[in-house]
Amino acid sequence: MTRRHTILIIVAAALLRCTAVDSAPRFVYLTWQGDTSTTVTVYYHTDAAADDSTVRYDEQPRGGRIDDYALTAHGGRHQIEGLADSRTIHVVELSGLKPATPYYFVAGDLENGFSDEHSFRTIPNDGQPIRFVVGGDMGILPDVGELMARAGATDPMFAIVGGDITYSNGNIVNVGRWDQWLEFWQRHMRTPDGHDIPIVAAIGNHEVHGGFEQPREHAPFYTGYLAQNRDRTYFTMQFGPNLTLFVLDSGHVARHDGAQAEWLETELQRCRQVPNRVAAYHVPLYPTARSFHYEFSVRGRTHWAPLFDRYGLTAAFEHHDHAFKRTWPIRNGQRDPSGTVYLGDGCFGMPHRPLTEGSQWYQAKAASLQHFWSVEVAGDQIHCRAISKTGDVFDVYPPDAPGAAEAEQMWAVLAWPESIDEAIPEQVANRRLDSTITWTLLNPLATDLEVAFEISPATGIRFEPDRQKLTLAPGTEVVVNVAVTSDEARNRLNVHTLWRVDAGRGAYETVHTSVMFFRREAVVETVRGLAAPPMDGSVPALAATPPNLTGFAQRADGQPAAQGTDVWVTAIPAGLHVYAICHDADMANRVSPTTPENSFTFHTPELEAGNPFWNDDNVELFLIPQTEPLGALQYAVTLGGATYVDRKSAAGEHLRGSGMRANSSRFEDRWTAEFLIPWSDLGQQGPPPPGTVWRLDIARTHTLNQSDISRWANPTASNHAAEHFGYIKFE
């Protein structure tokens, strides 16, 4: 062989190696589709197509030398439709494994190359202790890596991820978010011995295009990357003889009731002799950062909680709210030592949210902070520890378990801002503010407490001071006064304050929110000679005058809505006429899932679950006429033309029949919503006398990847909080 030929061969071999490296598995991760003691499922991705999916494995480390591994398994592969790249997802199940045994493996194929060596441990099946971690609402911000590393350091045998994994919203174009998250997982979710930590994932609203009540195809990454149960988004896993896990779908692809509830009862009954039975799902039955009456929380309490009570579920891990909580044990909707404890609420990487104003009867502890749960099951005992981003244990369940005293000391630091006594005097004129927030700070510890606060800036609001550092001696009290002024009208004032607290063990952060509501008022003109409008989207005659309902604000933070809404409300002989212009720069991307055939008039509470109007852009009108026997009235129209009516008496009974007419029309940069509600619907013979005052609010839902609700008056988490509706006066 000539020297020239030798060089060519070397170059060719080098090129082959480069090709293999470039297309070798980028992500390798583990879950289960079978027995957790004797099987494991290996997932890996290649950027190129492949004709083989192989895992070489052994009970001994082999340093990645492919031919040295004693065992080989082959599996299947698939692609996700619509991805811009040619990525292939490989799925290989290893079976016949020994329980409680380490295994070492490489994944890939001869054409594309193999991964570096990975390892895992099978689950013991003889009653040895089982350790795992739980958390949800992760995302891809840097905090998630820190929390993953802390979680891996607890030496778990697996990890439960309670939904909202990457915030891809089921959108194919967001594949990069999954790539970043999987890189985080590979890098950080390893035990101290270097073993990969298997994933058990529940589905959340941010895995699904549309969030709730969508077909399985709207969650392409969850079903394509983490198909633990091949056909369903709810399933059971058994870990040794002392632990059963029920992973549930809180209304995203599967409804709470029906088939899932029937399955859940069957499984709870089948596993009722297992000492520890825990559930994991996304939306909390007992929330911390949203209303107790949040729709999907209510559905969980309606359809699942009675089953948890009947069969004695040990614990439920909840997420979605981006906060921390531990409830009292609950049975039959009240505190009961024999009940189920609910642990949450999903802040394993995403920024923490302020808690719902006011403590809830079911909360034993709650705070705005990032964390995860570390759980150990031994025999009939379960020991749960809440761990902060800094690695400190700050809560323990049961409360008398080992480490509880130390956890209470840490809790005193972490939860300290929750004990702040605040006051905002009612000095509001025309919804403009000139007032003072007063915080009374008390150091409950036996050591000095370094305290710093920083108030988030808000458009049109001034705080003085907006930040300060203080040192509190043990047992001392300090009063802090912050002057607050605003120059513009708004629905509410949200004061988001970041607190940093240091008791000598490192700084901890939490948030506190002060909320002040502003009364909104509007005048409704009565025009007695005006004919009924055509209800075809054309501009009504009175639209030449300025709209009487403007200044819509976002539900989430009270800031002006990103998409403006202008509304004209007029009293005419035919009824109350409402015409809304919904400005929208994204009209070209608006695909409406509803049609007029989805229209619905509410007769019984059971029917609401089948109405999908909230999945579409919509305008909702909430009205309380000061007329007996009528109570709260709700009307809605969607971008797709579906309508919704819910009329209640003052006693809360649903009223049959409605003469409401509604229309929606699409334009290049806006859409319109129009209602004509006959006076008979409102308990009137005609327009109310001048000076009559009614309660009203209008909510607009703007959905693209996720819901964005803005409202004219009501600044709370619930559209139905009538105490915060605005006032309209007929003139």
Image (tube, rainbow, N blue to C red):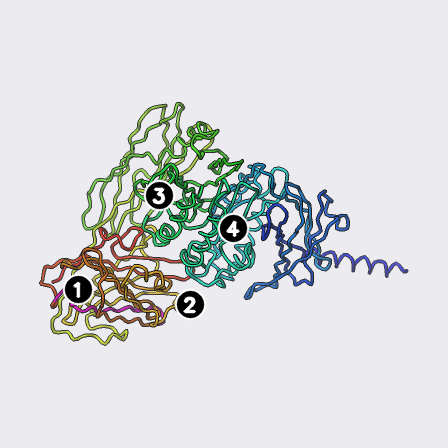
**Mark 3 and mark 2 in contact (Cβ < 8 Å)?**
no
Query: Which one is in front, 326 or 21?
Result: 326
Q: In this figure, which residue is indicated by the disc labeled 4?
A: 236
SS state under label 1: helix
- Reading the image, the residue beneath label 3 is 355
**Residue identifier under label 1:** 682
Estimate the spatial distance between the alpha carbons at disc 2 and disc 1, rounded to whole Å: 37 Å
Looking at the image, residue 613 lies above or below residue 136? below
CA–CA distance between discs 2 and 3? 34 Å
Crowdedness of circle 3 by 10 Å Cα count: few (<14), some, many (20+)?
A: many
Dot 3 falls on a residue whose secondary structure is: loop
In the image, farthest residue toward the right: 1
Mark 2, mark 3: which one is toward the viewer?
A: 3
Read off the magenta span. Answer: 667-684
Q: Residues within 10 Å of mark 4 (few under 14, many from 20)?
A: some
Check whether the beta carbons of the residues at disc 2 and disc 1 lie within 8 A of each other: no
Indicate the quadrant containing the C terminus: top left, top right, bottom left or bottom right. Answer: bottom left
Q: Nearer the viewer, residue 206 or 173?
A: 206
